[in-house]
Amino acid sequence: MVWPAGEAAFVTGAASGIGLGIARALVAAQAKVALADIDGPRLADVATELSEAGGAVTTVELDVSDADGWEAAADRAEGALGPISILCNNAGVNGGGAIDDTPFAVWRWVQRINVDAQFLGVSAFLPRFKRRGGRAHIMNTASMAGLVPMATVGAYVASKFASVGFTLVLREELRGTDVGVSLLCPGTVASRLSRTAEEGQAKLLGREPNAAVIEQNGALQAQGADPDRVGEQVVQAMQDRQFLIVTHRDWESLVIGLHREIEGTLADFDGRYGTDLSVQMMLGGVNPVAT
Ligand code: NAI
């Protein structure tokens, strides 16, 4: 059997878009899947579809930002499918506008779901992976917005840069172990993201969703990559223990632009403060904070 056949995965945001694409690809690869999402009705439809396709699946209705919900969710998933060895922290939301036009409630909503929840997911499952030993994998969905600063979505960009940082550290901490780490940074993918963004914010702020915004953003979103193909790409990447997963080449110049600015600033600086002991220790393979 080729990995991940026979393994059990926990996928958040599995009721739609990329999470659903990952779940479908995992089922096609003969993995068992715990489908986790806050959207109960959609989750039920997805479970029916995947069961009818011969998949071994179970549903876990979970608000991923609920710190008290994760252990019970993990227990439920493992009770139904056996030990989980693959965690896909994929659920996410977009929200807010320009930074001075973003209510703090929206800012926190985005950070809680896009970043805090990835920490909570890892906190629930990584100790189980370590205790049991054997091959396991953690995949976090960030975004190209975690590598490139996009104007007018500051809350989202801040959350995705945080997700990238979190996942890079996770990779360092798990280097040389049986727990693989992957980071998905998609460009635009055809999903319900713009709809859930507007509906979620409307609920949060006690107003009606703006149908024009949903239609306009939805039309752009619909032209994105096929989420099922992205799901297949993710499963292949996890199988290959590939770290960074991207979906659109045309972000390259923007990524390079930011990194050139960093390189240029460092190269032009006169080094007036001399040697930095912290970086010397890191270059020698020592974490200065832990010592
Ligand atoms: P989607 O809106 O189609 O799917 C997201 C799923 O997450 C939904 O089923 C939703 O119910 C669920 N969800 C939202 N809040 C939740 C919560 N608190 N607890 C549990 N589940 C929750 O969107 P999509 O595009 O599939 O998003 C998946 C991930 O991909 C997100 O992290 C998103 O930021 C990321 N992404 C998406 C891109 C795109 O263009 N679609 C581009 C880059 C990243």
Image: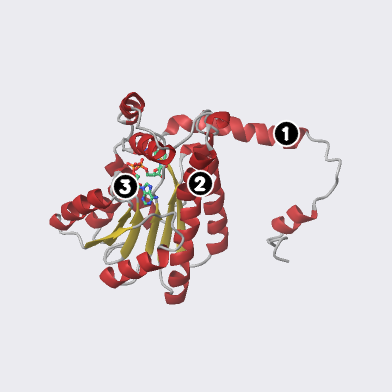
Q: Position of residue 162 (x, y in %)?
A: 55, 47
- x 16%, y 58%: residue: 51
Disc 2 vs disc 3: which is toward the camera?
2
* Nearer the observer, 39 or 149: 39
**Quadrant (top left/top right/bottom left/bottom right) for the N terminus:** bottom left
C-alpha gap between disc 2 and disc 3: 24 Å
Q: Position of residue 113 (x, y in %)?
A: 45, 49
Instruction: Determine whether, in the image, residue 160 is placed left or right of residue 6.
Output: right
Disc 1 vs disc 2: which is toward the camera?
2
Is residue 175 at all visible to an observer of this figure?
A: no
**What amino acid is labelled 3 in the image?**
Gly
Residues at badges 2 and 3 in contact (C-beta under 8 Å)? no
Q: Position of residue 19 (x, y in %)?
A: 32, 48
Q: Which residue is mark 3?
A: 231
Q: Which residue is mark 1?
A: 265
Question: Ligand 1 is located in which of the four quadrants?
Answer: top left
**What amino acid is labelled 1 in the image?**
Thr
**What amino acid is labelled 2 in the image?**
Gln
Circle on res. 111 = 2
User: Which residue is farthest front?
Assistant: 206
In the rendered image, which quarter is residue 239 located in? Answer: bottom left
Establish whether ligand 1 lies closer than 8 Å to the Cβ of label 2. Answer: no
Residues at badges 1 and 2 in contact (C-beta under 8 Å)? no
Instruction: Determine whether, in the image, residue 184 is placed left or right of residue 277.
Output: left
